Image (spheres, rainbow, N blue to C red):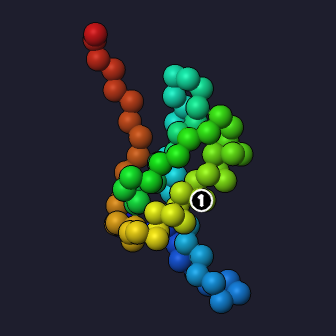
Amino acid sequence: MAYGCLVKYVVDHKMIREFRVVIEKDEDGYFVASLPTLRGCHTQARSLDVLMKRVREAIELCLEVEEPVPTEFVGVQRIAITA
């Protein structure tokens, strides 16, 4: 299923959009979030609570300058190589 945002619906005359957020933890212990449907939309924080607040702010700012692009979530794979 291709999507720009996952779901659009209206609550109290306001359009609500839901997005998938990819969250990783970097080597310094920061949680890093990115949104595949909003290219260049990233943020980071030390805690997940703060991260989710920042993600909401980042989404709002990104939506001011671009519309979500259709993507399709396929999954996450692990691959091993010799190094």
- Residue 57 seen in render: yes
**Amino acid on which the number 1 mark rests in the picture:** Glu
Left or right side of 61 for 48: right
Q: Residue at x 69, y 45 (%)?
A: 50
Residue at 47 percent across and 48 percent down: it is 42
Residue located 62% across and 39% down the image: 45
Give the percent coordinates (x, y) of residue 15: 58, 81
Q: Residue at x 53, y 77 (%)?
A: 8
x, y percent for residue 18: 55, 67
Q: Is residue 14 above or below residue 73?
A: below
State the quadrant of the N terminus.
Answer: bottom left
Q: How many marks?
A: 1
Residue placed furthest toward the left: 82
Instruction: Give the labeled residue for mark 1.
Output: 57
Tell me the quadrant of the picture where the C terminus can be found: top left
Residues packed near mark 1 inside 10 Å, few (<14), some (14 to 19) or many (20 plus): few
Vertical order, 53 against 66 (above or below): above
Picture layout, residue 48 above or below residue 67: above
In the image, 65 versus 38, the foreground residue is 65
- Percent x, y of residue 24: 52, 36
Query: In terms of secondary structure, where does tag 1 sit?
Result: helix
Residue 34 vs 2, above or below: the answer is: above
